[in-house]
Image (cartoon, helix red, strand yellow):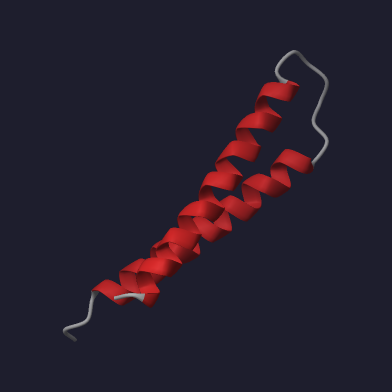
Amino acid sequence: MSNWLEPLIFALALITFVLGVSSLIMSFLPQTAGAEVMKSKVEYGFFGTAGIVLCMVCSYALAHV
């Protein structure tokens, strides 16, 4: 019961991985035509990449706790 840090870091890594991958998938899916299509694709790609990088940081932290 004394080790609370590892499960919290693991949960954070899992959440960021799932959100990052789903954002990357959303950036590759076709969207309806409009003025904001490219902007939303770039935003989804950015959030996906940021989620994957944050997952890697959490995995590194989990390995060195």
Quadrant location of the N terminus in the rendered image: bottom left
Q: Is residue 40 above or below residue 65?
A: above
Quadrant location of the C terminus in the rendered image: bottom left
Q: Is residue 19 left or right of residue 9?
A: right
Residue 18 location (% of width, % of height): 57, 59
Q: Is residue 63 above or below residue 42?
A: below
Q: Is residue 5 left or right of residue 15?
A: left
Question: How many badges with numbers are in the image?
Answer: 0
Residue 12 location (% of width, % of height): 40, 62
Q: Is residue 57 left or right of residue 39?
A: left
Residue at 70% x, 18% y is: 36
Q: Is residue 22 left or right of residue 64?
A: right
Quarter-of-image position of residue 45: top right
Q: Residue furthest top?
A: 35
Q: Is residue 50 above or below residue 16?
A: above
Residue at 79% x, 41% y is: 29
Residue 26 location (% of width, % of height): 71, 43
